[in-house]
Image (spheres, grey):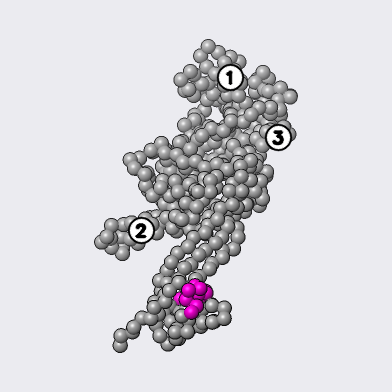
């Protein structure tokens, strides 16, 4: 191999996580790594002998990588234009040991190690699944939000797009977390004290809420970490895993009408409406999205993906789902008004609820025996008809009434 000038230095290669291969031909030739402190490095293969592969690597800003991917700058000019005016070298053996790290000034760089003048990007980028490393590094399960599409670059996304998409995601998370946490609290054993329930509720808030920890390269990749600081046991799923699984189920539901109805039955129509708003936002912004939950301590993964090509079919499913239901409900209270001509009524319950509707046809002939100063037990049919994105129509029919004798 070519003799190198420069100085031997220590370098923490264990702190690097491989993000993408930008050039690949019978193996990676140009790869992107990120350090645990968020610094970006490109590793460029330059030489080989019977024992080692030699790599040149250097710190770089993702914006420069994007210019290279957009063919606005050659790889040669990327290297010669480095602000730090130096690069690193390392030899790698067959067992992936990093040996002899060295720093070399750009003006001492061997000419044969520079790419050609026409070294413009002409390959298919490959992104690595680095969630296992990040999960172990952060001692936590993680969500990765991967965005691609119009206005998304290499490790960057237009702020006006991100500011529209994140609130939609947060609306889904918040609504789902509210229902999920209530179900967990209600399932606690009988005899659980108020203090224990309060403590559990506080833990659940941390388990089901997230902080954004990284905006990484390889398209725009955001890492969301639960606010809980408890390290996963690696033995059983905890509430973080269970909530993430439900979150992914919601995001996957738009591919089948039955799944949408199941989400509506389990968590309510409002959550489905917020999911529909999120999909509409993806359509407006021409953005595809992928969510991946990963727990390295259990090897557990959940995944949801809506590409730009799939958005129209998901919207079609949502727009054709009706969320109709009908319930018969019993109340006690007093009539406030009755209209003999139209058959409409108003009723105030003992819980101070006001119900407006119309009488069943069979009751119309008995309307004359109803008085306003007596208490009645009534049964009403409440039917709700709605399509996602449309206004809910509620129809209330009075099915039966019976006078309730009040004891003094």
Does 223 appear above or below 370?
above
Residue for point 38% across, 57% down: 183
Say the numbered circle drawn on residue 70.
3
Q: Secondary structure at mark 1?
A: loop
The reply to whether residue 186 is in sight is: yes
Mark 2, secondary structure of its residue = helix
Measured Cα–Cα span from mark 3 to mark 1 = 23 Å
Residue 218, image quadrant: top right
Q: Is residue 210 visible?
A: no
Mark 2 is surrounded, within 10 Å at the Cα level, by few (under 14), some (14 to 19) or many (20 or more) other residues, namely: some
Q: Position of residue 219 (x, y in %)?
A: 61, 39
Query: Whole-percent x and y of residue 238?
Result: 37, 47
Picture quarter containing residue 138?
top left
The residue pinned by badge 1 equals 26
Stretch in magenta: 353-365
The residue nearer to you, when weighing 92 against 149, is 149
Q: How many marks?
A: 3
The residue depicted at 45 percent of the width and 83 percent of the height is 370
Please state, as top left, top right, bottom left or bottom right, where the N terminus lies in the image. top right
Mark 2 or mark 1: name the one nearer the start of the chain: 1
Label of residue 185 in the image: 2
Q: Reading the chain from its start, which is encountered first: label 3 or label 2?
A: 3
The C terminus lies in which quarter of the figure? bottom left
Q: Earlier in the sequence, mark 3 or mark 1?
A: 1
Q: CA distance from mark 3 to mark 2?
A: 52 Å
Q: Residue at x 52, y 74 (%)?
A: 358
Residue at (62, 31) in percent of width and height: 125
Position of residue 126 relative to residue 381, above or below, is: above
């Amino acid at each position: 191999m070519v003799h190198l000038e420069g100085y031997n230095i220590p370098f923490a290669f264990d702190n690097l996580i491989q993000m993408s291969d930008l050039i690949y031909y019978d193996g990676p030739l140009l790869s992107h790594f990120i350090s645990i402190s968020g610094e970006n490095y490109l590793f460029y293969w330059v030489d080989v002998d019977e024992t080692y592969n030699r790599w040149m690597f250097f710190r770089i800003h993702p914006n420069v990588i994007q210019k290279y991917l957009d063919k606005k700058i050659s790889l040669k000019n990327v290297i010669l234009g480095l602000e730090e005016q130096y690069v690193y070298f390392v030899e790698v053996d067959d067992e992936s040991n990093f040996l002899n790290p060295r720093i070399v000034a750009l003006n001492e760089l061997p000419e044969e190690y520079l790419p050609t003048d026409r070294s413009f990007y002409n390959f298919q980028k490959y992104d690595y699944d680095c969630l296992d490393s990040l999960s172990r590094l952060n001692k936590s399960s993680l969500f990765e939000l991967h965005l691609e599409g119009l206005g998304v670059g290499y490790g960057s996304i237009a702020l006006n797009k991100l500011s529209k998409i994140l609130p939609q995601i947060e609306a889904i998370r918040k609504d789902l977390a509210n229902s999920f946490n209530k179900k967990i609290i209600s399932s606690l054993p009988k005899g659980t004290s108020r203090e224990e329930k309060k403590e559990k509720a506080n833990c659940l808030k941390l388990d089901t809420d997230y902080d954004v920890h990284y905006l990484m390269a390889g398209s725009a990749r955001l890492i969301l970490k639960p606010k809980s600081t408890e390290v996963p046991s690696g033995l059983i799923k905890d509430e973080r895993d269970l909530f993430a699984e439900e979150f992914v189920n919601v995001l996957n539901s738009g591919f089948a009408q039955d799944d949408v109805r199941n989400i509506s039955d389990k968590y309510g129509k409002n959550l489905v409406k917020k999911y529909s708003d999120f999909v509409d936002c993806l359509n407006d912004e021409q953005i595809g999205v992928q969510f991946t939950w990963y727990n390295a301590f259990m090897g557990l993964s959940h995944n949801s993906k809506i590409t730009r090509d799939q958005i129209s079919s998901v919207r079609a499913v949502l727009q054709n789902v009706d969320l109709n239901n009908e319930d018969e409900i019993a109340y006690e209270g007093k009539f406030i008004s009755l209209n003999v001509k139209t058959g409409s009524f108003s009723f105030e319950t003992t819980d101070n609820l006001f119900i407006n509707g119309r009488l069943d046809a069979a009751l119309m002939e008995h309307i004359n025996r109803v008085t306003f100063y007596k208490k009645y037990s009534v049964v009403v049919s409440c039917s709700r008809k709605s399509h996602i994105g449309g206004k809910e129509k509620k129809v209330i029919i009075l099915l039966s009434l019976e006078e309730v004798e009040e004891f003094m």
